[in-house]
Image: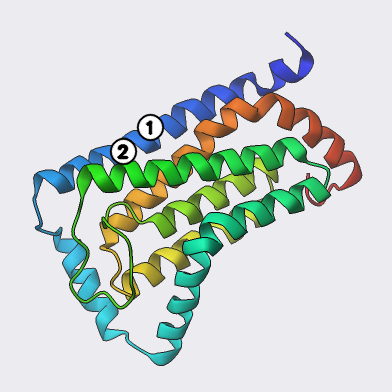
Amino acid sequence: MTTVQRRVAAPVIAYLAVGSTLVLLSCLLGWWILARGDEPFAIDTAWNLLVAELWHPALTGFSQVMNFLGGGWVGVLAVPIGGAIALVVLRRPWAAAYFLAAEAVSAAGVQVLKHVFGRVRPEDILVVSDYGSYPSGHVTNAATIAVAAVVIFPRVWVAVVGAAWVVLMAFSRTYLHAHWLSDTVGGALLGAGAALIVAAAFAVPMAREGMAASAKRPWLG
């Protein structure tokens, strides 16, 4: 076992354990929702009514922007490819490969769970969306990006920005009534879990190039 392999052994175990737990929790929440039929949780209904009372043109505009950035060709193609290109420019090809793989696994997981659970979206939805309310694809994608960013650049400011991105995305999805609050929770669990599980597979090569990058760009690491 090389020095790098010994160094990442504990993180790999943590990635797999935490990531698997998060994905399992997302699935269990989905099964709970399925078992309840079309009846939303009390917190879902309460939150849906609350955000309806918060209606404001500025919030609507903001949420529409988040809707555009977090899904469709932007979220599925532009962000993953753009992020990978940026990482290659920073001479982090393994990190780029990890980011693309995490995004692909996350997106596939969303579609699987949407078709397994087939939850109906809120009736007062303000945007056009695909089949299945659970889990939120936008929030899953946001969580995958946020966790992958922390894995690649383990800095506090990266974690803070990533967490803010996930929370804002979740708010925008419920504000537009595209999802129930529990859909966003399930999406966050799935996205974070997928990013961690995939990180385990890329841990060794990313650690090697990460050490080299830290020497040149300590602010990114």
Quadrant of the rendered image containing residue 124: bottom left
- Residue 173 locus on image (x, y percent): 36, 68
Residue at image position (44%, 78%) is: 64
Residue lying farthest to the bottom in this orientation: 57
Q: Quick one: label 2, few (<14), some, or many (20+) residues within 10 Å? A: some
Q: Is residue 164 visible?
A: no
Residue beneath disc 1: 21
Give the answer, above or below, for where 190 lies relative to 73: above
Q: Quadrant of the C terminus?
A: top right
* Residue for point 78% across, 46% down: 88
Q: Residue furthest right?
A: 216
**On the picture, is 53 further left or further right than 59?**
left
Q: Is residue 51 visible?
A: yes
Dot 1 falls on a residue whose secondary structure is: helix
Label 1 sits on what residue type? Answer: Thr
Give the left or right position of residue 64, taking residue 37 as reference: right
Q: What residue do we see at 16% from left, 43% from top?
A: 32
Q: Secondary structure at mark 2?
A: helix
On residue 6, which mark appears? Answer: none
* Residue labelled with disc 2: 25
Q: Amino acid at mark 2?
A: Leu
46 is higher (above) or lower (below) than 103 = below
User: Residue 27 falls in which quadrant of the image?
Assistant: top left
Contact between marks 2 and 1 (CB within 8 A): the answer is yes
The x, y position of residue 51, in whole percent, is 29, 78
